[in-house]
Image (cartoon, rainbow, N blue to C red):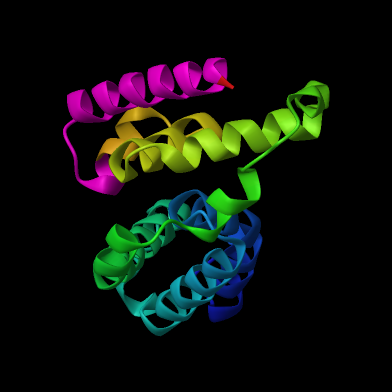
Amino acid sequence: MDSPASFEDQLAALLPRLRRFAHALSRNPADADDLTQAAIERALRSKAQWQLGTRLDSWCYRIMRNLWIDTARSRSRKEKLEAPPEEAERVGEDPREAMDASLDLKRIMAAMERLPDDQREIVALILIEGFGYREVSEMLDLPIGTVSSRLVRGRTALLAMVGEQ
């Protein structure tokens, strides 16, 4: 389990989950790919810091979250001045198409994109990735009460946004 091949194999198995989390954070498939790649690169460079016996997925999620925070900070000025390109794609959507299951998923993802960053990451980790409150609390270095309240607020906001459409 502590051989380099084992570490890389475990990391490769995490790729789909890391990509989903990257998409939840970035709200953009290209940015999600870049973020996933950067997180994997950092994990490979830092594998000596990973402690055998701890959860590799939690460690990788934390790496990805930290990378995203750095990216988001560098982009914050531009994002305050411009609407994301996805907004233009939603203008004039035919509401009849919402009956289709794939469009329901798009509506939920669009609503998820509108959540504040702190709520979106908690919702993604708990509701999509299936982590427990305590795991997310440790992963994000937040009190469990903060995780719980952000999840409640995020879930309530998602339901309200999906109900509006």
Front-most of 36 and 89? 89
Front-most of 162 and 40? 162
Left or right? Give the position of 5 relative to 96. left
Residue 106 visible in rendering? yes
Q: Which is the main secondary structure of the residues drawn in magenta? A: helix
- Name the spot of residue 152 as percent of width and height, x first: 34, 19
Please determine whether, in this image, residue 11 is positioned above or below residue 126: below
How many marks on residues? Answer: 0
Residue 97's quadrant in the figure? Answer: top right
Please determine whether, in this image, residue 42 is positioned above or below residue 124: below
**Which residue is at the far bottom?**
45
Front-most of 35 and 162? 162
The residue located at (28%, 59%) in the rendering is 80
Residue 95's quadrant in the figure? Answer: top right
Residue 129 visible in rendering? no
The residue located at (51%, 53%) in the rendering is 27
Front-most of 29 and 17? 29
Based on the picture, tell me whether residue 136 belongs to the magenta stretch.
Answer: no
- Name the spot of residue 111 as percent of width and height, x first: 51, 33
Please determine whether, in this image, residue 117 is positioned above or below residue 18: above
The residue located at (42%, 74%) in the rendering is 43
- Name the spot of residue 148 as percent of width and height, x first: 28, 22
**Which residue is at the far front?**
92
- Name the spot of residue 110 as percent of width and height, x first: 56, 39
What's drawn in magenta, residue-wise? 138-164
| The N terminus lies in quadrant | bottom right
| The C terminus lies in quadrant | top right
Based on the picture, tell me whether residue 139 belongs to the magenta stretch.
Answer: yes
